[in-house]
Image: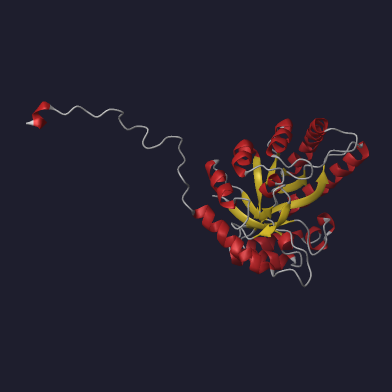
């Protein structure tokens, strides 16, 4: 069965203990760390890097998993020195994930660089991602490449994951980003299929050009969240749905609980709902095409 969690982007002011205890109380199975109270270089956060045993104990006591660490990495550079720097950053995140028993590290797909073209960029990024596989294997993590930047469509994600061709590299799928290029879940999810290692779940309203107007409660926007989950059920998907709705800190920001509690309820109801049986046939395809002849004795 699918598991649910939420990203620290929903609760930027919470410390780790508050996040974990609230996740447990609301019925979430895990949390993803995008940052922690304004600190985004996670291997440098003392509450994580210097207190790994305490973090593991906190998670175990509350029956909550650390589902993913979000790393500020995109393997899209044409500069070898920048690529080496990104590799070093991933190695730090992978080592921290190993210490915290976290199975996933998320990275970005990236952008097309100046004087480059889209196809060449995709091929180059695929090759650079392949260089990261030994780092992932050493720490036993899965690298999750999220569709973002200039590569938001499922075709882009499919190409990158397929180019690497290794189970240590999978896709973190974000349907809201795909909608900005006018791609619905009914195309995205079946295409990516088993390449999906995690789903970032959010809902939003979009204008006619595909621009995101604003985030909405799950089920009230254009992202067809219920349909996404139904499609994932058809793939026997049993990994994380991570609720991710970016919220700025400050007085104007809503209480994270007011956002998370209905999100947890909505996701749980969608997961528990019986799947719709889909068929290309009208009626029973096994029904006889012709009526059986009536025995003579029956007519009297």
Give the answer, above or below, for where 15 lies relative to 134: below
| Residue at x 65%, y 38% (from the top left corner) | 195
Quadrant for residue 139, please give it: top right
- 55 is higher (above) or lower (below) than 297: below
Q: Residue at x 46, y 50 (%)?
A: 274
Q: Nearer the viewer, residue 33 or 235?
A: 235
Looking at the image, the residue that sits furthest to the front is 208
Image coordinates of residue 270 in percent, x first then y, are 53, 54
Using the image as rendered, state which of residue 216 and residue 144 is in the foreground: 216
Which quadrant, please, contains the C terminus?
Answer: top left
- Most extreme residue toward the bottom is 251
Percent position (x, y) of residue 248?
Answer: 77, 64
Q: Residue at x 81, y 56 (%)?
A: 42
Q: How many numbered markers are drawn? A: 0
Up/down of 57 relative to 183, above or below:
below
Can residue 197 be spotted in the picture?
yes
> Which residue is found at the position 89% from the left and 36% from the top?
78
Specify whether residue 194 is in view: no
Q: Looking at this view, name the residue that lies furthest to the left.
A: 300
Q: Position of residue 114 (x, y in %)?
A: 90, 38
Image coords of residue 161 (percent x, y): 71, 35
């Amino acid at each position: 069965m699918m598991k649910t969690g939420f990203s620290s982007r929903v609760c930027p002011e919470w410390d780790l203990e508050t996040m974990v205890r609230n996740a447990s109380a609301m019925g979430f199975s895990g949390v993803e760390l995008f940052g922690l109270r304004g600190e985004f270089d996670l291997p440098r956060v003392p509450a994580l890097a210097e207190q790994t045993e305490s973090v593991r104990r906190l998670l175990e006591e509350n029956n909550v998993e650390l589902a993913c660490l979000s790393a500020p990495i995109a393997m899209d550079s044409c500069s070898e020195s920048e690529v080496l720097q990104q590799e070093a950053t991933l190695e730090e995140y992978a080592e921290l994930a190993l210490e915290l028993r976290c199975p996933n590290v998320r990275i970005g797909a990236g952008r097309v660089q100046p004087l480059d073209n889209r196809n060449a960029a995709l091929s180059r990024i695929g090759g650079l991602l392949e260089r990261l596989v030994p780092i992932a294997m050493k720490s036993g993590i899965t690298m999750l490449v999220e569709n973002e930047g200039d590569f938001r469509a499922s075709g882009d994600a499919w190409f990158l994951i397929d180019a690497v061709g290794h189970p240590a590299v999978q896709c973190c799928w974000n349907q809201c980003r795909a909608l900005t290029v006018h791609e619905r879940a009914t195309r995205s999810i079946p295409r990516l299929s088993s390449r999906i290692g995690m789903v970032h779940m959010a809902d939003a309203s979009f204008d006619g050009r595909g621009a995101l107007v604003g985030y909405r409660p799950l089920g009230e926007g254009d992202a067809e969240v219920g349909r996404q989950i139904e499609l994932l059920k058809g793939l026997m998907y049993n990994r994380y749905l991570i609720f991710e709705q970016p919220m700025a800190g400050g007085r104007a920001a809503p209480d994270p609980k007011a956002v998370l509690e209905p999100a947890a309820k909505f996701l749980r109801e969608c997961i528990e709902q019986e799947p719709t049986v889909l068929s290309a046939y009208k009626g029973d395809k096994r029904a006889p095409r012709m009526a059986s002849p009536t025995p003579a004795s029956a007519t009297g």
